[in-house]
């Protein structure tokens, strides 16, 4: 399986030393990730040292995009205002799922305006907590989005006129069972500890041939997803939700 990488929670207030350390690792192995940039972050949990932060955040993001990094709009404020899981039901909280179409459209268009105001253009959306509903998809479509980084499966697929780029349900499994296809590893650099950095370094070193840049993933021709695929996806989401619950119980976090 070819593996692309996405980095969530990219914002001015994030922990820059951790982000830059992970970016350095990706640069070394020639992997260009997808960056989930939050237009107007109001999530106070995404914070950390400012050391090494660029003078102009937006210019920095634009430069990375020019270098070949892929960019997604990662919600708008990254604050959870409903207890809905939306289409996937992976988490029981959301910035969008459960709100009316008008509320969602208004919020999302604010995000787009902020991006455009900084000359940052993308047609890809990354939902905080993987939660969004059909109204989110319709509002996104109306605002010119056509790709979503989410879903399960072994290759990109089209559903409701949107192209979905699946994420990995289990990183260890994706590495161990080298099936055909593609997936995305989701990384939150802000919460990585020393052991995580070592684990990723070993992963990139041992599986050099498996990791690809996100822009290569975007080149893969998508398949059409019907009812059976959507059902399998619900099952995968339920399984991933249970897996992360077990992980939290074991780690006590
Ligand atoms: Zn996030």
Image: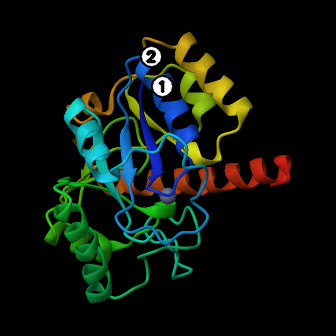
**Element type at mark 1:** helix
> Residue sitting at 36 percent across and 23 percent down?
212
Q: Which residue is mark 2?
A: 28
Q: Are marks 1 and 2 in contact (CB under 8 Å)?
A: yes
**Element type at mark 2:** helix
Task: Give 195 or 246, whichever is nearer the viewer.
Answer: 195
Residue 171, horizontal then vertical, whole percent: 58, 33
Can residue 74 be seen? yes
The answer to whether mark 2 is within 8 Å of ligand 1 is no
Left or right: residue 116 versus residue 165 is left
Left or right: residue 75 versus residue 69 is right
Q: How many marks?
A: 2
Left or right: residue 90 versus residue 29 is right
Quadrant position of residue 144: bottom left
Task: Give 105 or 52, whichever is nearer the viewer.
Answer: 52
Q: Which residue is mark 1?
A: 24
> Residue sitting at 48 percent across and 72 percent down?
42
Farthest residue in the front direction? Answer: 55
Label 2 CA crowd tier, 10 Å (few <14, some 14–19, many 20+)? few
Quadrant position of residue 197: top right
Residue 165, horizontal then vertical, whole percent: 33, 44
Residue 149, horizontal then vertical, whole percent: 36, 49
Can residue 220 be seen? no
Give the spatial CA distance, label 1 vs label 2. Answer: 6 Å
């Amino acid at each position: 399986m070819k593996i692309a990488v996405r980095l969530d929670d990219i914002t001015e207030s994030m922990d820059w030393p951790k982000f830059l350390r992970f970016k350095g690792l990706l640069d070394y192995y020639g992997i260009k990730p997808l960056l989930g940039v939050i237009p107007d972050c109001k999530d106070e949990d995404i914070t950390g040292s400012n050391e090494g932060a660029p003078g102009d955040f937006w210019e920095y993001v634009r430069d990375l995009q020019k270098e070949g990094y892929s960019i997604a709009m990662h919600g708008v404020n990254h604050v959870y205002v409903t207890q809905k899981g939306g289409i996937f039901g992976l988490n029981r909280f959301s910035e969008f799922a459960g709100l009316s179409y008008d509320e969602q459209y208004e919020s999302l268009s604010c995000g787009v305006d902020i991006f455009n105001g900084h000359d940052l253009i993308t047609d890809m959306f990354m939902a905080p907590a993987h939660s969004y509903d059909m109204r989110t998809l319709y509002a996104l479509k109306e605002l010119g989005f056509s790709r979503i980084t989410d879903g399960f499966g072994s290759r990109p697929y089209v559903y409701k006129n949107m192209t979905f780029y699946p994420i990995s349900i289990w990183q260890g499994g994706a590495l161990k069972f080298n099936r055909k296809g593609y997936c995305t590893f989701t990384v939150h650099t802000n919460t990585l500890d020393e052991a995580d950095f070592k684990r990723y370094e070993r992963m990139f070193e041992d599986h050099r041939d498996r990791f690809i840049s996100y822009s290569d993933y975007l080149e893969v021709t998508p398949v059409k997803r019907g009812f059976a695929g959507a059902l399998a996806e619900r099952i995968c989401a339920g399984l991933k939700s249970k897996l992360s619950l077990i992980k939290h119980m074991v780690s006590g976090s």
